[in-house]
């Protein structure tokens, strides 16, 4: 059984843990760089991306997570998607640069503008929970759009990485987590 780490510094990492376990993998909380050594894939949950960057820096984890991403799969949701992007705007901020995309923080508006919407996921309807969600403004040529909302990409993948601007962990639908677990199971280690 593959071990999927869930970055447990901020955000609803407990909901991700449950979704990972429903998807057939073992979930492990990741709080230190050393925790990365025992996992096969990593989820960076939602939260506040600037705060998450500060926590990664205070725990001396930013470079460790970035290096992990050069070898193994990472799935970022909401703030996690912001951290995976190569370019962040509104305002600009540092990121891991693992997916060639430009992401605008709080692209749909403030907390009051949060919403639940239906998106098309591989030809089937899926519920998407957007909370102060970012908007993907540009997707590089190596990235693939898996789902859109209001004509903007909301679920993309590039290589072994996956990014969602919404919170799939807040629904009972584990298709996206299962997709990530399958990516982790299929990745080859160098």
Image (tube, helix red, strand yellow):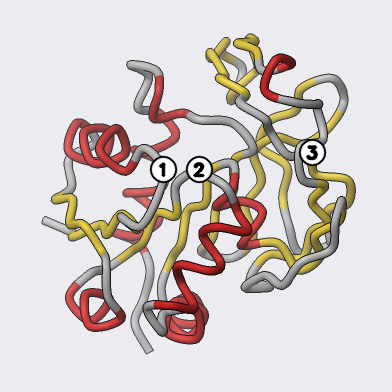
Circles 3 and 1 in contact, beta carbons < 8 Å:
no
Q: Examine the image and state in which quarter residue 24 appears.
A: top left
Q: Secondary structure at mark 3?
A: strand
Spatial separation of the CA atoms under disc 3 and disc 1 = 19 Å
Residue 124, image x and y in percent? 56, 13
| Pointer 2 local density, CA inside 10 Å: few below 14, some 14–19, many at least 20 | many
Residue 156, image x and y in percent? 66, 46
Q: Secondary structure at mark 1?
A: loop
Which of the image's four quarters has the N terminus? bottom left
Mark 2 or mark 1: which comes first in sequence? 1
Location of residue 100 with respect to 35 vertically, above or below: above
Spatial separation of the CA atoms under disc 2 and disc 1 = 5 Å
Q: Secondary structure at mark 2?
A: loop
Q: Examine the image and state in which quarter residue 11 appears.
A: top left
Q: Which residue is denoted by mark 3 in the rendering? A: 135
Circles 2 and 1 in contact, beta carbons < 8 Å:
yes
Residue drawn at (47%, 53%) of the image: 75
Location of residue 19 with respect to 144 vertically, above or below: above
Location of residue 186 with respect to 173 vertically, above or below: below
Q: Which residue is denoted by mark 1 in the rendering? A: 11
Residue drawn at (27%, 67%) of the image: 31
Q: Is residue 148 left or right of residue 63?
A: right
Spatial separation of the CA atoms under disc 3 and disc 2 = 14 Å
Residue 72, image x and y in percent? 41, 73
Q: Which residue is denoted by mark 2 in the rendering? A: 46
Mark 3 or mark 2: which comes first in sequence? 2
């Amino acid at each position: 059984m593959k071990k999927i780490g869930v970055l447990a510094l901020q955000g609803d990492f407990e909901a991700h843990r449950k979704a990972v376990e429903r998807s057939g993998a073992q979930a492990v909380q990741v709080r230190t760089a050393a925790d990365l050594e025992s996992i096969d894939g990593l989820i960076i949950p939602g939260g506040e991306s600037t705060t998450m960057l500060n926590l990664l820096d205070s725990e001396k984890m930013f470079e460790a997570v970035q290096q992990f991403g050069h070898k193994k799969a990472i799935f970022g949701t909401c703030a996690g998607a912001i951290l995976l992007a190569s370019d962040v705007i509104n305002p600009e901020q540092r990121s891991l640069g693992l997916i060639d995309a430009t992401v605008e923080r709080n692209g749909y508006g403030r907390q009051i503008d949060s919403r639940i919407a239906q998106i098309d996921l591989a030809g089937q309807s899926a519920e998407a929970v957007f909370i102060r969600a970012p908007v993907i403004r540009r997707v590089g040529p190596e990235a693939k759009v898996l789902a859109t909302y209001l004509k903007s990409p909301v679920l993309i993948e590039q290589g072994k990485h996956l990014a969602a601007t919404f919170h799939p962990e807040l629904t009972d639908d584990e298709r996206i987590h299962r997709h990530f677990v399958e990516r982790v199971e299929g990745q080859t280690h160098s």
